[in-house]
Image (tube, rainbow, N blue to C red):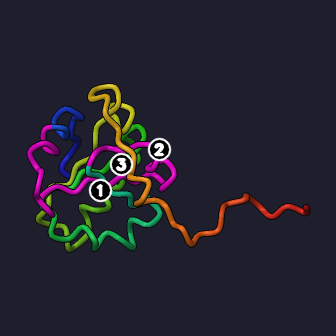
Amino acid sequence: MDGEIDPEELAGLIAGDEGSDSALRIVDIRDRRAFDRGHVPGSECIPFPELTTRVAELEGAARIVTVCPHGVASRQAAQLIGSYAGIEDARVESLRGGIEAWERDTGELVQPDPEETANPTAEPDEGPDAPF
């Protein structure tokens, strides 16, 4: 792990990374429901429990920033990613203060396009099985 990055600095990187496919990867380690409520622009959802099995997806990135609610778990995620053999050339950082600091300092969270999250073949979630 290469340390932490402030929300303002990450916002500048995002603005300068337009059109680049792999230079900057922002990894939100929250679960999908939290991610769908709002996330850092350009981020991708890789929940922390899936990180060890999906870390290879990040190979080839020049810079990786991990994001969580308060900036604590994302430091652990950044350390885990940084220890992966395929990531040794990438700069791996955690977003200082997490989503909370991002909202406070930039005021900008995005939500996924409803078409991206909609699954027309999925059964509606009725919750746990009920006896009625």
> Nearer the viewer's eye, disc 3 or disc 2?
2
Q: Which residue lies under the disc numbered 2?
A: 37
Where does residue 5 sit, x and y in percent of width and height?
21, 40
Query: Is 22 contained in the magenta span?
Result: yes
Question: Which quarter of the rendered picture does the C terminus lie within?
Answer: bottom right
74 over 52 or under it: above or below: above
56 over 36 or under it: above or below: below
Q: Which residue lies under the disc numbered 3?
A: 74
| Mark 2 or 1, nearer chain start | 2
Q: Which residue lies under the disc numbered 1?
A: 79
The image quarter containing residue 116 is: bottom left
Where does residue 79 sit, x and y in percent of width and height?
29, 56
Where does residue 107 sit, x and y in percent of width and height?
31, 28
From the viewer's perspective, is 78 left or right of 14? Answer: right
* Viewer-side residue, 71 vs 125: 125
Where does residue 65 sit, x and y in percent of width and height?
24, 50
- Among all residues in the image, which is located at the extreme right? 132
Which label number is shown at residue 42? none
**Mark-to-mark CA distance, 2 and 1:** 26 Å
